[in-house]
Amino acid sequence: MTKDQVSMTKEAPMPKPQPRVWLLVIVWSLVIGHWSFAAPRPVAELLKSAKPSVVTVIHEGRGAAREGTGTGFVVGKNLIATCLHVVGEARPVHVRLGDGTKLEVLAVHAWDRKLDLAVLKVKGGEAMKALALGDSSKLIQGAPVVAIGNPMGLEGSVVQGVLSARREMELGEMLQLAIPVEPGNSGGPVLDREGRVHGIMTLKSRVTANLGFAMPVNALKPLLAKPNPVPIARWLTIGALNPREWEPMMGARWTQRAGRIRVREAGSGFGGRSLCLSKLPKPKLPYELEVTVKLDDERGAAGLAFAADGGQRHYGFYPTAGKLRLTRFDGETVFTWKILQDMDVPAYRPGDWNTIKVRHEKGLIKCFVNDQLAFDMKDDGLANGRIGLAKFRDTEAEFRDFRVGKKLTSLAPAPALLAKLEQAVAALKPVDEFDAKTVNELKPNANLNNELLRKRADLLEAQAGQLRRLANLVHERAVQDALRAEFKKDDAKVNLLRAALLVGKLDNADIDLAHYEKEVGEMATEIRAKLPKDADAAKRLAALSKYMFEENGYHGSRGDYYNRANSYLNEVIDDREGIPITLSVLYMELARRLDLKMAGIGLPGHFVVAQLTEGKEPQLIDVFENGKLISHKDAGTIVRNFAGVPLRDEHLAPVDNRAIIVRMLRNLIGISNENQPPEVVLRYLNTLLLLQPDSPQEHLNRALMYMRLKQNAKAKEDVRWLLENDPPGFNRDRLMDLFRRL
């Protein structure tokens, strides 16, 4: 698989050794590790040496309130290593030395969200000594280790332990340590008894207080070798709300991802109140305001704010404790708040997404949940004002589909359509032959009750599984239809951005395509705003590369290359990390909006782009390597290194949009064959064959997936296709044998 495609009993007395044997023992010991003979340093001595290189990392809340404290350590001149979650996103961050000196953070020099690692570049501290990095792969189980950190804010604390195991976890292979981890330890170094760093403290065990996990330091080394720097001013915008659209107020943490707004942490207002007001013009009465909201805990409270004065006064309509509440907030404290209505509403679905809506008329407020009128209330305490979102206490909540208008049409399916669909779903039969009639015939036999109950449970489980499969299939077909419609157009009219986002939507139904299309458009607008009106193509290209790689930290995934997330363009945009083809798609789409003509070049094992300029040779650009301009000779080296073949002229031919999407799907197939269920692989295979039905390898692969699911009839159809089309490179006799066995 190419890189881009992703494949002793009781002891006997020891005889007196001869000199030559002793020599061999000494040499062998040196080969397997010089540390075997090194005397471990006392912990006090080790701490004295290492402590000056360990710092406190603090990220702040709004209003400069301290919010989180962690640990970091010096790894180079002006460079501090820590955990990404210690740094936080869209938050001011600074570094403090043991003597209290604060260092300004200039940039996030390198970072990897999947590994939870970050390296900060600071101003000052040049005299600080970097800790030596060990080879974490050679740290043996049972080896003594020492961790330095700031548990519970107690700076410069040290604790001893051992490497108890290595564990494969969500972040990858981690060092399991017999060391307690507390808040503030994260990001601290794990040292061997010679003072070399072997890990970065990351996680606390949920099972026992005396167990923690550290990211191996070997995972940090590629980041130091190939950093992806982001200036701190730009870092503060990652995950943040668009300031042109939203204005958060009274603390809490409001973020946006995948078209959804999320709020966490208590606000600074009384009762943890926080607002997030829209920058839309104040609507004139009458108007309707709507959002779909989901609470992490029904004891919380979050929903709509309206008629807001930009300070303490506004209305709020929100679910709380399983009820719906309308409140008028006339001031800062609860003594100035008036609950206008608070009641149970049958249409509200606890623990689920709920669409809440208000209709604000002069002197009248109507409140709805899931298109059902909850209550109406006469009140004219507040008139026109701003609209937005509100949350209270330490609620975590997500919002989507925020909208306002004179009269909003329902986004829910029409009642007639919903009834028809529910009737069709209710009529579905289970996959086995057990039915209700059989149950009724057996009921009089009391000795069969237990068996019947088990069978009924099996029946319901089969139906539930069938409904889940049907839901997945309906979603898959809808996405495939959207892709099919896109590729009915001429290639020049295909919306490559939307098509690439649809590939990700195969696995995530919640992706908001319009949100990402809008975001890419805003990115291009931001680039163009920094250019003079007469900027030539060279300046526009330079501005594009600077924006992506220098200012925003987009980078090639190296430590987690074969993660499916790297093939989802929405996650590449959010995480600023991807593989060659997804980074190239984003680069080309931004270039198109800057009037730069680009084409994708599908090299064997790697994907690059070419800038097409009339009268000139195409300029190859390796987006995975931060937009590096490369020559044909460079391309030849890449192809030899990744695919082991010489570069040919046809390798440099531009590929069309269909070929790009097919290649993205092949990447997903390649990395999913071994570690995903057949149903997942079939999703990609079916989509690919929809776009490229004459692909023999995918027909064979699909047949094998169907065989794994024991769906031999479907597998036989793909083998039949191979026999009828007789593609080169396939053994016809073996295909015939397989066809007969099916």
Image (tube, rainbow, N blue to C red):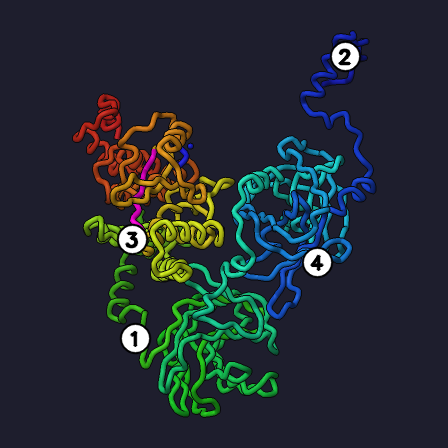
Is 15 displayed left or right of 723 in the figure? right
> What residue is shown at x 47% (from left), y 43% (from top)?
557
Give, as a single range, the part of the protein colored magenta: 596-603
The three-letter amino acid code for the residue at tag 2 is Trp
> What residue is shown at x 40% (from left), y 71% (from top)?
402
Q: CA distance from mark 1 to mark 4?
A: 54 Å
Query: Of 427 and 247, which appears nearest the observer?
Result: 247
- In the structure shown, which secondary structural element does the residue marked by tag 1 occupy? loop
Q: Earlier in the sequence, mark 1 or mark 4?
A: 4
Q: Which residue is mark 1?
A: 409
Of the numbered discs in the image, which one, if any, rests on residue 604? none
Can I make out residue 209 in this image? no
Q: Which residue is mark 2?
A: 22
Q: Which residue is mark 4?
A: 102
Where is residue 104 shown, x and y percent of the image?
Answer: 65, 57
> What residue is shown at x 57% (from left), y 86% (from top)?
331
Q: Earlier in the sequence, mark 3 or mark 4?
A: 4
The question of residue 379 being in magenta is answered with no
Above or below for 196 versus 188: above
Where is residue 446 shown, x and y percent of the image?
Answer: 42, 54
